[in-house]
Image (cartoon, grey):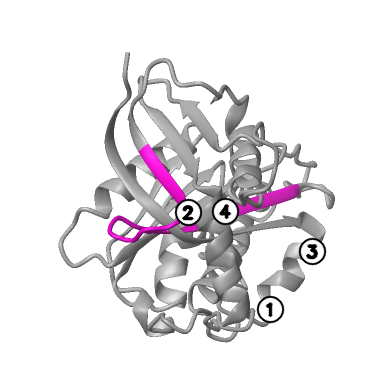
Amino acid sequence: MTTTRTSTCTITAHATVAARADAIGLLREATPPTGGRALPARFLRHADEHTVVGIRAVQEAMARLSAPADQDGPGSFDRFAVVAATCAAGRPASARTLVQYGEGGAVTVSPHVVPQCSLHATASAVSVGLGMHGPTIGVGGGPEAFGEGVLAALSILAEPGVAGCWLVLTAWDEEPGLDDRGDVPGDATCRAVALALDRAATGGVRLSLGTAPGLAGVVRAVGAAGTLTEFAARLDPRPPDAAEDAAPRWSLRLDWGAMVTLEVDAVAAHCGRARRAAA
């Protein structure tokens, strides 16, 4: 049976950020990469771990996208939508809040826990902090966040006036066990992948969502963390002289029957990197 795709777009830039819990504090105040937009002072002071790594991934992807001479620069992101698909974000902060409430009552609870731990917190932080004016939404929240994020992002790209969409995917590499204070072990790693999506652009990496029975290379990842880690590893295609078994395609069948597919034209992607290096 042949594949029937329902929606396809080009990934024009991407970045992956992985940070240990004991290093996220430094990342909150880190200067942006060259070409990335800076955040307002102390903007991430109360932000959830997923928001911190997610917004950093967007900054790094933004720096890559604005680097070529033929781009409009940072201003070209103003009409981008933002979709953030997080897996179990806000759990440590919620646990700490319950501990504090039990010990000292309502006066000990920070009001920041409400806006910073909501499903829309990461998407809103990216939109507000980096000056986006397109639609903004948080989706997922659980183990199916990856597929739900892809569906939402490809749907929003069809909206009039949307120039592109940032898709931000976050998860702990392994869901951390919390101590009796609700704190995360220092070696727990939170990972974010940021994708700049454009339905009209052409390029070496394409993201598709559709019905695709019988595709080779289907990945049946265990949990959201495994899916995100595998996906991040496949985003950077090998040079065109790599072995033919270098897996030019990555696919994930979703529970409701659709297929997310990452297709890489290694030659086009390699040429794009060469042009960026020479710019």
Q: Quarter-wise, where is residue 229 in the image?
A: top right
User: Which of the two residues, 4 or 275, is positioned nearer the viewer here?
Assistant: 275
What residue is shown with label 3? 23
Judged left or right of residue 237, residue 252 is: left
Residue 236 picture location, percent across and down: 62, 52
The range drawn in magenta is: 189-208
Magenta-drawn stretch contains 195: yes
Task: Point out the frontmost of discs 2 and 4.
Answer: 2
What residue is shown with label 4? 193
Task: Say which mark, if any, is on residue 204.
Answer: 2
- Crowdedness of circle 3 by 10 Å Cα count: few (<14), some, many (20+)? few
Give the structural element (helix, strand or loop) at label 2. Answer: loop
Identity of the amino acid at label 4? Val
User: Which of the two residues, 40 or 240, is positioned nearer the viewer here?
Assistant: 240
Residue 188 picture location, percent across and down: 78, 47
Task: Say which mark, if any, is on residue 29.
Answer: 1
- Residue at mark 3 to residue at mark 1: CA–CA distance: 11 Å
Q: Earlier in the sequence, mark 4 or mark 3?
A: 3
Q: Earlier in the sequence, mark 2 or mark 4?
A: 4
Q: Earlier in the sequence, mark 3 or mark 1?
A: 3
> Does 58 sit above or below residue 153?
below
- Crowdedness of circle 4 by 10 Å Cα count: few (<14), some, many (20+)? many
Task: Point out the frontmost of discs 1 and 2.
Answer: 2
Give the structural element (helix, strand or loop) at label 3. Answer: helix
Task: Say which mark, if any, is on residue 88.
Answer: none
